[in-house]
Amino acid sequence: MAHKWGLVVDLDRCTGCEACVVACHAENNVPTVGKDQAAIGRAMQWIRVERSWEGDFPNPKVRFQPVLCQQCDAAPCEAVCPTYASYHTEEGLNGQAYNRCIGTRFCANACPYTVRSFNFFNPSWQKPLNLQLNPDVSVRSVGIMEKCTFCVQRIKSAEIQAEAEKRDLKDGELTTACAQSCASKALVFGDLNDPNSEVSRLASSNRAAKLMGELGTKPNVTYLDRGAWQDAKNS
Amino acid sequence: MERRNFIKISALTGVAATLDACRAPDKQLIRFIPEENLIPGIAVWKPSICTLCSAGCGLQVRVMQGDAEVERHGERGLIKMGLAKRLEGSPQNPINAGKLCARGQAGLQVLYHPDRITKPIKRSGARGSGQFQAISWDDALKELTSHLTALQASRSANALAFLARPLRGQRRELIEKFLTAFGAPPAVWYEPFDEAVLRQANLLSFGHAALPTLDLARADYVISFGADFLGTWNSPVAQSIGYGAMRRGRPGRRGKFVQVESRMSQTGANADEWIACKPGTEGVLALGIAHVILSQKLAPQSIASPAASRAGSQIAGWSAGLPEFTPEAVEKQTGVSAAVMTRLAHEMTLSGAAAAIVGGAPLAQTNGLFSALAVNALESLVDANRDEGPILGFTPEPPLSNAGEPAAPAQASFARLNSFAQSVLSGKAGTPQMLMLYDANPIFSAPPATKIREAIARIPTIVSLGSFIDETSAQADLILPDNAPLESWLDSVPESGSFQSLIGLAPPAVSPLHETRPMPDVLLGVAQHLGGDLAKALPYATFDAMLKAALLPLRAQGGSVAAKTDDDFWQSVQTQGGWWSAPAAAGWKSAAAKPAAMPQGKQASHALTAPEFAGSATDFPFYFQPYLTPSFGDGSTAHLPWMQELPDALTTAMWSSWVEIHPKTGAMLGIQQGDLVEIASQAGSLRVPAVLSPGIAPDLLAMPVGQGHENFGRFASGHGANPLSILAPVVEPSTGSLAWAATRVKLARVGGPEQAKLVLFAGGMSGFPHDEKPR
């Protein structure tokens, strides 16, 4: 059976430490843009940790929420791309074909989650920082839109390995860089088509919700509500 | 142009280019012979150890073959070599179990940093001018040894000083042995946030002069007094793993977490209940809760337990039930309502496994030790007498004679730095004539009142063994650059974070990119060259020989490595990334390290003292709290671009520093988000952008540590301001630790957002980039 990749974000476990953000930069060759470009909103992050404040001193509340491409089944970004650079893969990912992208940025406008990053310049890694680049992931050039791929290079390599060994992929055998680094296990990646996978089990929790689910984008990323003390019995 | 002509011209210029290359060999890229046998495209995972904080997490490094542009013997060229591509946590390591924090993953950029010192350099201009010239390793070592022999010859070996960040394990052992055999005084270990107060308190309360290890996965209730245990305090990765399990690891059971602090930290933001408490009164609040537990007999079986009576005996009035700390009296001092205290006392004693921990700002007050002892007493009351053992325990020492927990806490590093600076400035005979520097940057991280900048300027010879130019090493006369950690033999003896005793060890993950040499090998080489006692004390050719000699006794201890011969053992330790004892059955029950006996004759209990602050409340109306960030620590990782561009968890600020101000305070002083403000204390002033935050007390200003470097490479220099530079030299009197939260300040608006240039990830689009210059 084909895979359908999904991610669960347990907001009760997330501590806002942003290890996932650095893991993503390292794994996917996401460039840093420097102070001046960051100041005008051009910092690039495939995954970001949002915080929302409620209340005021002495009773302020903060909620952290990692936001990344939701890999929607009904993705607004795909429909608007004039060159089919944004497309839907057979395994349910919102793919981005860099060599088809002409930089119209329609997809970034259409995405309700603002998780797409645009290369306003050719990225640069001052030597020898270029040696940190992951050879499994291509570096994007100026004028190209980029976004979270669910670490498709890791998915592909695990699938090829499993096929070579003539076996099925096991749950937990592969994970994304963000989920790999997550110390509190707030991020769990896996196959939603496998009813026994951890991600399927968590995605059917009654704490589960989709980000802006009312838009009908049918995301494959599921958020689990924080809940409160003594609410745990409902998990 | 005709095709024929074009070919002619290009042929000619091609020839010219070739000739040119022959004349100037430095302009052509030579291919050096590869040093290793790696298969192109195949990744190998190698063990290593994270050195970016003291937690000692185990790493696995993804190494792949690649082409690196390097310089060897004065010639630039390409070499095929193993390149580190990614850092992940080591899955077997008992501390971090495959996980790694944001800072740890950026360790890759230490290795590939464009500002690393690539070969030995010698000062060629005025001191601190930043002018250096490259010299050969032979010349550099000759110069270093000649300085040392000159000291020996003039019978002033005691005039050698060594200044480093606090190290553990064999690097520390090596430096200590070197200094002793040379006849020099002990090293000055400097780290501004050195936890000396907590170690002292834990020795008195629990019999361990160490940071605690928390079994959070089993906890049902955690109250933390200021400890940023999910961000920067103690062993954050181990604690985050436990925290996740405490929240959702046990179906039907979710632990509650309460944070007490006056400025909401990243850790506090995760709390179920956040309690604001006046700075310096956290210990009082702990005793208020303890009073309720004692007077209402909420934990009858714990009160008489040996642990509780030991920790309790440190607090005056404990056996009488803390009569001075009734909730009503405590409410007046702390600002926390008596009803909340009573409720917390009930919740804590009724909800299963509870723990109270303390860290951060409460310890950085003049009454820090009292606050720590008070929280420890509460901890022993709520966390004793459980079958599985307490939540809070201590990592057992590795079974080696020269590793692990010292019997008494080392002198607070601030006190040591102060006396060092004073002895230099006194100018008396026998004062330091030569300074060796390693990975410590006190000119940046010590308050200016220590006069460390002036003291260092007075020392005739300064040799740095670090990898980067920073504010302190910029003063060096000679720099012998160390390998990057991933290029070095590493060992670690983690103080906390593991229930098993543990020694981390790893060979170099990659070969050196530049012409650097490992600091330990340089010292060992110098020791052999100087001969005499030094050569006898350090009879090793290289550091790995010293590590092997130190670790081989562990073979007899069993644990994680079963080996028939010493060589097998040594190989297995290297592949595993260290040695650890067999895992304890569950929690602390069988693992608990034995507490030290109560020191005799030191039974005096501690009575409450009010916190004292530098600066009067009328002239300086605000408390001032510098705080550590996960990205920068004490500022030593501010040079990594990934850390600079990582948005702060609570403000989304990047590439800058800022001060957090409550909106009410802002309104009172006419300060809006992004304005430039001036903060002044008795000791100095600085200017930073303002961030209005609802998570801070109106009488408190808080500022992240780590930015404000003048001279720390291209990515760190010139961003923001350094809060440590306006701290008054207030100390916690019993340990001599820097009381970094005990300075009062005043605040004024001095400019608008155009001057302040606050960079935020969220909301950074407010100014449309219409006037931007094309690049």
Image: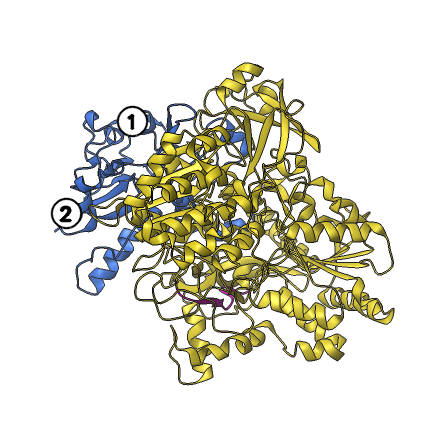
Chain colours: A blue, B yellow
Spatial CA span between label 2 and label 1: 26 Å
Horizontal side of residue B708 vs B319, given as left or right:
right
The circle drawn on residue B193 is: none
> Was residue B507 drawn as part of the magenta stretch in this picture?
yes
The residue to which callout 2 is attached is A193
Q: Would you identify the image quadrant in which residue B256 lies?
A: top left
| Residue range highlighted in magenta | B500-511
The residue to which callout 1 is attached is A112
Q: Identify whether B510 is placed above or below A213.
A: below
B21, B771: nearer the viewer: B771
Q: Would you identify the image quadrant in which residue B273 lies?
A: top left
Name the amino acid type tagged 1: Pro
Q: Residue at x 59, y 26 (%)?
A: B622
Mark 2: give few (<14), some (14-19) or many (20+) Cα within 10 Å: some
Number of numbered callouts drawn:
2
B39, B702: nearer the viewer: B702
Residue B706, image x and y in percent? 58, 41
Horizontal side of residue A168 vs B714, given as left or right:
left
B532, B392: nearer the viewer: B392
